[in-house]
């Protein structure tokens, strides 16, 4: 009996498997923003240089500046000696092959086309960092923002005018967030696809109820836009356009505030 009791105590006191928290270098602004929330600050040896640039960053630039950065070259990354390199699916094959030859694990993340795609990426990167609980905390924030931004009433026609005068396709993440907020993507209803160019003349010939202006082209701030009856023209931060993860929280809240204002 004594032997059995001692064996039971020994088994219960046995430590669980050790959680690995690898060091990471991120080469993509979208993975930068997620890793800054789901990994420990001592794990992330560097972010991409884009995240320090207010014109390209999808995260708080002041936070990005607390991390190291690289230009994405193999030499810079190797100097930091991370255990994992995280990049986008457009990582050049030659760069990926060089990392593989040098024994560096490479993980790539694609463009999130939906909220669910982004949630899967958050969980992927959180598991990679060894902090799945931080990933679930971020997932809850995303789901909460989408839920509170949901508009159950009739949607209003809207156009999102992005930098360069282009519009998002119906399958883009930001289009899903617009629909969730009660803003129907009028450019998609016109048959326009991802990154199609929308001229000022075409916009004025059939104006939407809401025009979200995220670009800074001359035509996107033309005086003629101020005289369109029944159209609300509102600015939209370009930093909310391209990434998922924590960006969804800010984008969903912004779109919901626009929808409430025009109602």
Image: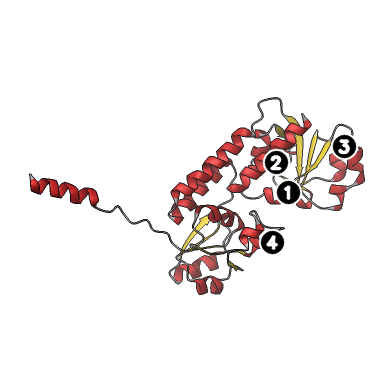
- Lateral position of residue 142 relative to residue 157, left or right: left
Tell me how far mark 3 sits from mark 4, CA to CA: 36 Å
Q: Which mark is residue 53?
A: 4
Assign the N terminus to one quadrant of the image.
top left
Q: What is the crowding at mark 3: few (fewer than 14 residues within 10 Å), some, or many (at least 20)?
A: few
Q: Residue at x 69, y 36 (%)?
A: 256
Q: Earlier in the sequence, mark 1 or mark 2?
A: 1
Residue at the disc numbered 1: 237
Residue at the disc numbered 3: 205
Looking at this view, is 135 or 112 the one in front?
A: 135
Tell me how far mark 4 sits from mark 1, CA to CA: 14 Å
Q: Earlier in the sequence, mark 3 or mark 1?
A: 3
Which of discs 3 and 1 lies nearer the camera? The answer is 1
Kind of element beneath mark 3: helix
241 above or below 143? below
Tell me how far mark 3 sits from mark 1, CA to CA: 25 Å
48 above or below 257? below
Q: Earlier in the sequence, mark 3 or mark 4?
A: 4
Residue at the disc numbered 2: 254
Label 4–label 1 contact, CB within 8 A: no
Kind of element beneath mark 1: loop
């Amino acid at each position: 009996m004594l032997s059995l009791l001692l064996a039971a105590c020994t088994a219960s006191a046995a430590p669980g498997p050790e959680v690995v928290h690898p060091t990471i270098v991120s080469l993509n602004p979208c993975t930068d923003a997620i890793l800054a929330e789901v990994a420990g600050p001592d794990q992330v040896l560097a972010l991409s240089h884009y995240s320090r640039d207010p014109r390209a960053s999808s995260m708080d630039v002041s936070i990005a500046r607390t991390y190291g950065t690289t230009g994405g070259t193999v030499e810079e990354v190797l100097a930091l000696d991370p255990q994992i390199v995280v990049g986008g699916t457009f990582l050049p094959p030659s760069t990926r092959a060089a990392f593989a030859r040098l024994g560096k694990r490479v993980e790539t993340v694609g463009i999130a086309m939906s909220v669910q795609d982004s949630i899967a990426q958050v969980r992927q990167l959180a598991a990679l960092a060894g902090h799945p609980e931080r990933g679930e905390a971020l997932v809850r924030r995303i789901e909460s923002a989408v839920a509170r931004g949901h508009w159950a009433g009739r949607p209003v026609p809207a156009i999102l005018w992005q930098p360069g005068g282009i519009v998002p396709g119906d399958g883009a993440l930001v289009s899903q967030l617009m629909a969730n907020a009660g803003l129907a993507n009028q450019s998609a209803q016109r048959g326009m696809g991802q990154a199609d160019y929308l001229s000022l003349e075409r916009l004025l010939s059939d104006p939407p109820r809401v025009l979200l202006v995220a670009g800074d082209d001359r035509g996107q701030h033309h005086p003629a836009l101020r005289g369109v009856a029944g159209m609300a023209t509102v600015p939209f931060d370009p930093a909310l356009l391209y990434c998922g993860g924590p960006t969804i929280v800010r984008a969903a809240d912004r779109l919901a505030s626009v929808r409430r204002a025009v109602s």
